[in-house]
Amino acid sequence: MADEAGAAVSAGEITLQAGALRLAARVWGEEGAPKVLALHGWLDNAASFEPLAEALGGRVRLVALELAGHGHSEHRPPGSAYHFVDNLPDVLAAADALGWERFTLLGHSLGAAVASFTAAAAGERIEQLLLLEGLGPLSGAAAEEPARLHRYLRQHASQDKRRRRIYPSLDAAAAQRAGNGDLSHQAARLLARRGTEEHGEGVRWRHDPRLTFTSPHYYTEEQVLAVLGAIAVPSVLVMAEEGLLQQRPTTAGRCAAVADLEVIRLSGGHHLHMERPAAVADPLSGLMKTREQGSRP
């Protein structure tokens, strides 16, 4: 990768001890640059931020953390579940392991949901919030909880009988990933290159299969709005015109709940930070300039 001057933008690989888990991360940029902790989407991995890191050209110290069970990070122990809220202490523990007291938090999709709730609950740690195609977690009606719990228990009971799919090649795994969403084959291959491992005569995805289970609990929309209303840091939400947020009836209310939120709409799909990284880099650069100006005596 190259920065604006044409010099290589180096990428590093680190492992962070976040509580009881070892979480993997990819790192770009110099130590002294503004600190940005990035959180990927569901079943994605740190490679999803590689195009954006290239577009930023080393202007930030970008650490793309892989959430538990994703990419090269450890899976949660047998018998435990992947509850949405458990990601919040993992994020703060990873920041502690980096030695970061305050930092900008960047998230895409699931990562944006985690980032927004983290900013609401631990705003003293967050300088700025940049959200890509996500603002809070999915919500559900209270009456839906019994059926959701039933599905979860059924999936949990059958987990030992499930076999992870083996693909004949990395390209085959990438084609499957691209076919399930808005990703180009090139972007899907970037995720597959990091997110798969050799197994027998082919490859399989590294992520924990339990991540695909039905969540045993959804917040109600009223609860989500209450949490989003507690966000008190400068925030930017980048929405794709052909993305998921545009289709959700809850989006307008959630945007209204965040006091200091700038909404930017860009053409593209849900993974626009991979497909249109230069366009997404502009809002982040703007936030950095605001921070630099505000820190001057």
Image (cartoon, rainbow, N blue to C red):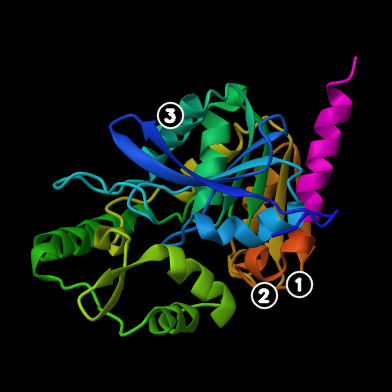
Residue identifier under label 1:
267
Let me know if residue 136 appears in the view: no
Q: Residue at x 76, y 72 (%)?
A: 267
Counting every numbered tag in the picture gives 3
Which element is circle 3 on? Answer: helix
Q: Which residues are magenta?
A: 281-297
Sequence-wise, which precedes: disc 3 or disc 2?
3
Q: Which mark is residue 106?
A: none
**Residue 93 has which mark?**
3
- Could you say where residue 193 lies in the image, as x and y percent from the top left? 45, 69
Distance Cα–Cα, label 3 vs label 2: 34 Å
Q: Work out which residue is located at the far top of the displayed protein and give it.
A: 297
User: Label 3 vs label 1: CA separation?
Assistant: 35 Å
Q: Are marks 3 and 2 in contact (CB under 8 Å)?
A: no
**Mark 2–mark 1 contact, CB under 8 Å?**
yes
Left or right: residue 77 compared with residue 285: left
Q: The disc labelled 3 sits on which kind of residue?
A: Ala
Q: Could you tell me which residue is drawn at 73 percent across and 46 percent down?
A: 58
- The secondary structure that dominates the magenta segment is helix
At label 2, the amino acid type is: Glu
128 is higher (above) or lower (below) than 219:
above
